[in-house]
């Protein structure tokens, strides 16, 4: 039996729903299908590396739709503004449990903004002698890129606005909304 989720209404912080839950679900199906196709002949499991915390909902929906063998792992990084880090500076706070040497890795990230986080992760993982690396990003703010990144699986392109829901937060709020909403930071 499937349980239907009630859809929480917008609060005064939230301007509008940008992407509704059904649209998200259909797109995640498509992405999982593409990943299945790409890796269907792989002999070892694909290592999915979710970037905490923002990717945890996207990753859990994505991995449950995959039919190829896979292993779920996580890393945590500091994001700018949180610990007073300088913009563009990324630090690894928690590493994967899996040894990534000679493995096929798919980084799963919530959103591509400047691109600094993904650039850092691709560089770090590549230096560990991985067999292959690709990236899946749920949202992409194309106008904001500061570095060139090759992303193989993108959920949706979005404008340069702050968004919350489906794992993404504003000061730890709104992560578990089932849709993506545009946030209006209150004065
Ligand atoms: P980047 O390194 O600039 O690409 O930043 C990526 C990180 O910034 C993401 O993984 C998010 O954690 C955070 N981020 C950027 N834009 C948003 C947003 O609109 N909502 C929530 N988090 C965001
Ligand atoms: Mg993130």
Image (tube, grey):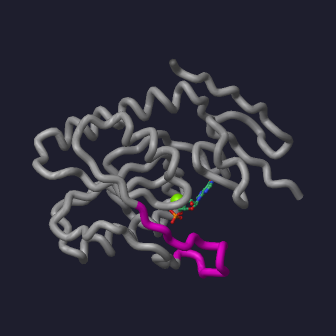
Q: Main secondary structure of the magenta part?
A: loop
The C terminus - image quarter: bottom right
Expressed as whole percent of the image width and height from the top left, the position of residue 127 reads: 24, 77
174 magenta-colored = no
Farthest residue, direction top: 1
Q: Residue at x 11, y 41 (%)?
A: 41
Asked if residue 86 is among those painted magenta in the image, a careful observer would answer yes
- Residue segment shown in magenta: 74-88
Q: Nearer the viewer, residue 101 or 168?
A: 101
- Left-right relation of 58 to 30: right
Instruction: Give x and y (percent) for residue 152.
Output: 31, 48
Q: Residue at x 26, y 58 (%)?
A: 105
Give left or right: position of 29 versus 15: left
Give the percent coordinates (x, y) of residue 166.
58, 43
Say whether residue 169 is left or right of residue 141: right
Position of residue 147 in the picture relative to residue 66 (left or right): right
* Label total for image: 0
Please provide percent x and percent y for residue 128.
23, 75
Q: Residue at x 70, y 47 (%)?
A: 174
Given residues 153 and 39, the one toward you in this image is 39
Vertical order, 162 against 21 (above or below): below
Which residue is rendered at x = 43% and y = 50% of the image? 137
Residue at the limit of the structure toward the front, as seen here: 1
């Amino acid at each position: 039996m499937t349980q239907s989720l009630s859809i929480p209404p917008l609060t005064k912080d939230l301007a509008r729903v940008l992407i509704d839950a059904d649209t998200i679900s259909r797109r995640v199906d498509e992405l999982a299908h593409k990943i299945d196709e790409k890796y269907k002949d792989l002999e070892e499991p694909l290592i999915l590396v979710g970037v905490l915390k923002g990717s945890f909902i996207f990753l859990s929906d994505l991995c449950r739709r995959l039919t190829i063998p896979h292993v779920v792992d996580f890393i945590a990084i500091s994001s700018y503004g949180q610990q007073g880090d300088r913009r563009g500076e990324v630090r690894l706070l928690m590493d994967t449990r899996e040894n990534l040497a000679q493995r096929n890795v798919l980084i799963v990230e919530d959103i591509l903004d400047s691109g600094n986080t993904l650039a850092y992760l691709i560089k770090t993982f590549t230096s560990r002698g991985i067999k292959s690396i690709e990236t899946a990003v749920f949202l992409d703010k194309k106008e904001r890129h500061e570095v060139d990144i090759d992303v193989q699986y993108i959920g949706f392109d979005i404008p340069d606005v702050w968004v919350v829901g489906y794992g993404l937060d504003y000061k730890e709020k709104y992560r578990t909304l089932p849709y993506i909403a545009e946030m209006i930071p209150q004065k």
